[in-house]
């Protein structure tokens, strides 16, 4: 069992507070990503789990056992580094056998020359070599075993780094931005391979990345970090659809979520000149931020032409198109809503659907759009998420 | 470095370190390093101390750093005003400065041409530069000496500088440095109407200040401290460098140790003081020149 | 367009010649011609004392290999190198590694160890000879207080090479240390972290698996430059021992100097110079060969 628990971890470098009261509970066999902008503390947290850094306060438990004082080699943890950190003077086979040599051979059997006199060297080396060969075969790098890192491509080095981590049968597998040195195409492929490796090995993975796509596609749960704190720790779909704060909502999702300023109003919430019949639960006063995902706005028609369905279900508005980005299957529209002309919004629209033929669309054109009130996300001034207390007009009707 | 101390800490937890915390090891290491440093610095301490003592105290059985009888003024007065050491220092300065100026004047344009201009014979010249790096003056001293003797140039400043007027090492070092200068900027400058000389003076040289400073220090120190070549070509007292004077007038101090070590202090002080004032440049100079760019 | 282009290249070539002309001329006069001349002179009995000389073929070389003085100088140089090289190499490596880990006092220690490098060896050799004095020197005073010595450091045939080596080690340790520090700081920190994760946390393992192999090219460079330095031993010998006592400190370069500029046997001295050149070339080739092969990534 390798459940990984962090309790109230604190870390400062000099006067900079890197981690503030971080707690995290990773289930056995779970794939967890730590994601956030650079400097958010995600790498430091990983290095604390690996014990490359010591925490100022807090506990690290692996399989329920406190490991604060244990050296990395006794923690049964493997780590893949961002730049792979392969030993350039060693062959692939030697690189991969390092953890085993260190664990299974006594010091005298590791010394140059003298090692040939040590019985352990002759007894253990063949089994270490066989083990390395097995893992290499599993990763399909058997043919590279005699080469040196300098003779390998980026993707091959990546696999060797994985192999070196795998040979030791770790309980927890740590990865520090392992894909950032690969080109885009290879990244997608290796992403898939790492997911498969996780599935087949059943190990606990902790994966650090700044790329939300990596985090979202590979993880069981994602811990989104900022300023040394975990903002939200949840499965990817919840992080997207049900963010705890505006920071989470803004980090997750590309293109970024639209946020409009709102004010409480007798009939709901006033956004620009419009008043939407929605209300935030428990919110009494103060400004609001209304988050609208780009796909929560749908194009319902072109003004002047008869509208194409759906009109009754949403909040109606008109969009002035200022920039069109053609993404292939869909278009990303940048523009302004008529009721709120000072804020830019992004709208993701399926091509060829609502507004007719795509090439007929020009900038400076006006479109009719409808906003799905069920998919609006409300935040208070501090960015905390507010629950939606239903759509006002319906409640008014019921009361009447 | 954190990882190293961490690992120590871990290793310690299973063994000796359970009793001795890491800080004790660290302090012990620091102590030993300072002990070693004392050995390195002691000759200087001894030198300065002796230069302040009267002759009979220099070899006193119970050595003390602070002189029992202070003879510093007298010793330095003898060296600076009764003997021509200031003059010898001036000779050293003239020779070192002359060498350095010529080396920079010849090496910078040559290095630029080798790095950035295309001309026939470029690779032959570069090959000659590389080959030249391995040849010390000790190998060519005989024909150069004969040549200077035949032209009656022995015992002149020119003779003292001649073998060092071009530094193939400087050409190599600067060429490596200039090569990293972006071609696009040079091309843009040419389009803007810069002449090649302006490119060298206004773009290349300012960008290569670290390398030029490093080499200058390297060259100056080497020639200030050189004994071999002045010993060969200098015959009269009025061309003697400080280093050579140190050797030639050694016996003059046999019965005046205090003044002798005051002279030694005066000879070595300029380089040591220069080093203490610009130690970063010195150390960078060594790494840059030592590790071949 | 094409014409101006060709014209520009023409101009560039002329500028190139203009820029390299002074350096080329000096390289010819200072390196190329003297190398040829030294070879020619080595086939003559030229003495400078008289302008008359004869070509004597390989006689100077024959003399070299039958000359007991030459053999002794060579042996002395090798003995000196055998003390100087390992000691200066290991000391500077140990100091560099110890210094590298240090957080406090690093720069002050670096300065103190480097101080002898910039000092004038001629002046400092006098200090050493005074400190090594057989009767009144402070080193013997110190040794006697712990019951050893006195030693006649520079005056005994057995000790003189050791004493010269000590002076040279003192003057070069800081230089090598700076080179090693540069080499050490170029080792990626990630490799040490990977080694920690792999379980290599014993300092000896870290040294053998990471530091030493990664330091290979630097170590090679230090070894070769130190070897050449050892072969060029001159200043302390000329100043302190003049080859004595009884030729016990007559080293190669000092012999070549004596033959050339004291006895004016320029022909023979030229042959010695060429021998010296060949030795240096072997070192240079050795280094080029190994350093090229040891480059990683």
Image (spheres, coloured by chain):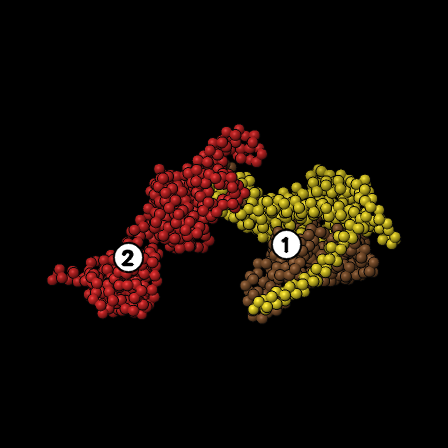
Chain colours: A red, B brown, C yellow
Give the image quarter of residue B125: bottom right
* Left or right, A137 with reference to B190: left
Q: Helix, strand, or loop for circle 1?
A: helix
Using the image, determine if residue C37 lies above or below residue A262. Answer: above
Residue drawn at x 12%, y 61% is A399
Determine which of the numbered discs, if any, sits on residue B24 in the image. Answer: none
Tell me: B201 left or right of B142.
Answer: left
How far is mark 2 from mark 1, CA to CA? 61 Å
x and y, in percent, of residue A99 in the image: 47, 38
Provide the residue designation for mark 1.
B289
- Quadrant of res B127: bottom right
The residue lying furthest to the left in this view is A400
Determine the residue positioned at 71% across, 44% down.
C165
In the image shown, does A12 or C228 lie closer to the viewer? Answer: C228
Q: Chain of mark 2?
A: A
Residue drawn 54% across the image and 45% down it: B26
Residue carrying label 2: A385
> Taking A24 as reference, is B200 above or below it?
below
Left or right? Give the position of B183 relative to A201.
right
Q: Secondary structure at mark 2?
A: strand
**Subunit ID for the residue under disc 1:** B
Residue that sits furthest to the front in the current view: C2
In the rendered view, tell whether residue C270 sits above or below residue A344: above
* Residue A244 % position (x, y): 30, 54
Quarter the C terminus of chain A occupies: bottom left
């Amino acid at each position: 069992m390798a459940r990984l628990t962090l309790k109230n971890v604190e870390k400062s470098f000099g006067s900079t507070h890197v981690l503030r009261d971080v707690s995290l509970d990773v289930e056995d066999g779970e794939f967890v990503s730590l994601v956030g902008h650079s400097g958010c503390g995600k790498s430091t947290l990983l290095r604390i789990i690996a014990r490359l850094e010591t925490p100022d306060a807090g506990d690290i438990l692996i399989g329920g056992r406190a490991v604060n004082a244990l050296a990395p080699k006794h923690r049964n943890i493997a780590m893949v580094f961002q730049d792979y950190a392969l030993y350039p003077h060693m062959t692939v086979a030697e690189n991969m056998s390092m953890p085993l040599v260190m664990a299974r051979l006594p010091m005298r059997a590791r010394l140059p020359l003298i090692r040939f006199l040590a019985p352990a060297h002759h007894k253990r080396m063949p089994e270490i070599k066989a083990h390395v060969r097995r893992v290499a075969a599993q990763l399909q790098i058997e043919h590279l075993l005699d080469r040196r890192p300098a003779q390998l491509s980026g993707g091959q080095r990546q696999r060797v780094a994985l192999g070196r981590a795998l040979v030791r049968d770790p309980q927890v597998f740590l990865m520090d931005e392992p894909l950032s040195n690969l080109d885009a195409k290879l990244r997608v492929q290796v992403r898939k391979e790492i997911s498969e490796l996780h599935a087949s090995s059943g190990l606990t993975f902790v994966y650090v990345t700044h790329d939300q796509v990596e985090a979202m596609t590979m993880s069981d749960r994602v811990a989104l970090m900022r300023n040394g704190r975990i903002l939200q720790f949840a499965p990817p779909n919840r992080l997207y659809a049900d963010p705890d704060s505006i920071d989470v909502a803004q980090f997750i999702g590309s293109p970024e979520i639209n946020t409009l300023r709102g004010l409480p109003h007798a009939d709901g919430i006033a956004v620009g000149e419009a008043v939407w019949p929605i209300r935030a639960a428990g919110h009494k006063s103060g400004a609001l931020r209304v988050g609208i995902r780009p796909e929560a706005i749908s194009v319902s028609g072109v003004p002047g032409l008869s509208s194409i369905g759906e009109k009754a279900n949403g909040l109606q508005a008109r969009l002035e198109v200022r920039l069109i980005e053609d993404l292939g299957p869909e278009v990303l529209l940048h523009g302004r809503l008529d009721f709120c002309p000072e804020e830019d919004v992004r709208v993701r629209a399926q091509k060829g659907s609502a507004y007719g033929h795509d090439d007929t669309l020009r900038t400076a054109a006006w479109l009719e759009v409808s906003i799905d009130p069920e998919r609006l996300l409300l935040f208070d001034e501090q960015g905390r998420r507010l629950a939606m207390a239903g759509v006002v007009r319906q409640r008014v009707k019921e009361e009447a | 470095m954190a990882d190293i101390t961490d690992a120590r800490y871990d290793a310690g937890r299973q063994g000796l370190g359970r009793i001795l915390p890491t800080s004790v090891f660290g302090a012990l290491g620091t102590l030993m390093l300072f002990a070693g440093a004392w050995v390195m610095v002691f000759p200087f301490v001894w030198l300065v101390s002796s230069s302040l003592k009267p002759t009979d105290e220099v070899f006193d059985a119970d050595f003390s750093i602070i002189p029992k009888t202070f003879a510093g003024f007298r010793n330095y007065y003898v060296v600076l005003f009764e003997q021509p050491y200031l003059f010898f220092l001036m000779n050293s300065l003239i020779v070192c400065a002359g060498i350095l100026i010529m080396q920079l004047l010849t090496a910078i344009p040559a290095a630029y041409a080798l790095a950035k201009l295309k001309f026939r014979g470029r690779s032959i010249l570069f090959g000659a530069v590389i080959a030249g790096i391995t040849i010390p003056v000790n190998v060519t001293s005989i024909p150069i000496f004969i040549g200077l003797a035949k032209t009656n140039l022995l015992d002149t400043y020119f003779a003292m500088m001649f073998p060092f007027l071009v530094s193939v090492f400087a050409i190599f070092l600067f060429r490596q440095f200039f090569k990293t200068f972006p071609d696009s900027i040079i091309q843009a400058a040419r389009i803007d109407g810069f002449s090649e000389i302006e490119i060298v003076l206004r773009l290349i040289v300012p960008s290569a200040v670290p390398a030029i400073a490093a080499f200058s220090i390297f060259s100056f120190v080497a020639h200030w401290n050189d004994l071999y070549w002045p010993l060969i070509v200098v015959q009269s007292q009025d061309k003697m460098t400080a280093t050579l004077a140190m050797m030639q007038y050694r016996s003059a101090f046999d019965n005046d140790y205090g003044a002798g070590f005051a002279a030694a202090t005066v000879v070595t002080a300029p380089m040591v003081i220069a080093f203490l004032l610009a130690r970063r440049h010195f150390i960078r100079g060594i790494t840059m020149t030592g590790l071949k760019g | 367009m094409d014409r101006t282009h060709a014209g520009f290249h023409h101009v560039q070539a002329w500028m190139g010649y203009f820029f390299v002309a002074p350096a080329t001329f000096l390289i010819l006069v200072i390196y190329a011609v003297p190398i040829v001349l030294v070879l020619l002179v080595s086939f003559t009995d030229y003495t400078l004392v008289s302008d008359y000389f004869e070509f004597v073929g390989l006689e100077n070389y024959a003399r070299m290999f039958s000359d007991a003085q030459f053999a002794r100088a060579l042996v002395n140089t090798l003995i000196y190198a055998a003390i100087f090289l390992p000691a200066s190499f290991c000391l500077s490596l140990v100091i560099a590694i110890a210094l590298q880990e240090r957080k406090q006092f690093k720069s002050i220690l670096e300065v103190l160890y480097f101080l002898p490098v910039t000092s004038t060896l001629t002046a400092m050799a006098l200090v050493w000879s005074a400190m090594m004095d057989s009767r009144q020197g402070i080193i013997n005073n110190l040794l006697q207080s712990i019951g050893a010595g006195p030693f006649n450091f520079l005056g005994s045939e057995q000790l003189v090479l050791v004493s010269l080596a000590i002076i040279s080690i003192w003057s070069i340790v800081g230089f090598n240390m700076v080179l090693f520090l540069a080499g050490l700081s170029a080792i990626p920190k990630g490799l040490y972290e990977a080694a920690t994760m792999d379980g290599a946390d014993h300092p000896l393992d870290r040294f053998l698996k990471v530091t030493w192999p990664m330091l290979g090219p630097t170590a090679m460079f230090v070894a070769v430059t130190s070897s050449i330095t050892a072969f060029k031993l001159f200043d302390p010998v000329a100043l302190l021992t003049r080859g004595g006592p009884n030729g016990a400190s007559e080293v190669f370069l000092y012999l070549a100097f004596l033959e050339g500029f004291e006895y004016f046997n320029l022909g023979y001295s030229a042959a010695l110079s060429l021998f010296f050149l060949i030795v240096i070339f072997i070192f240079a080739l050795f280094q080029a060969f190994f350093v090229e092969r040891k480059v990683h990534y």
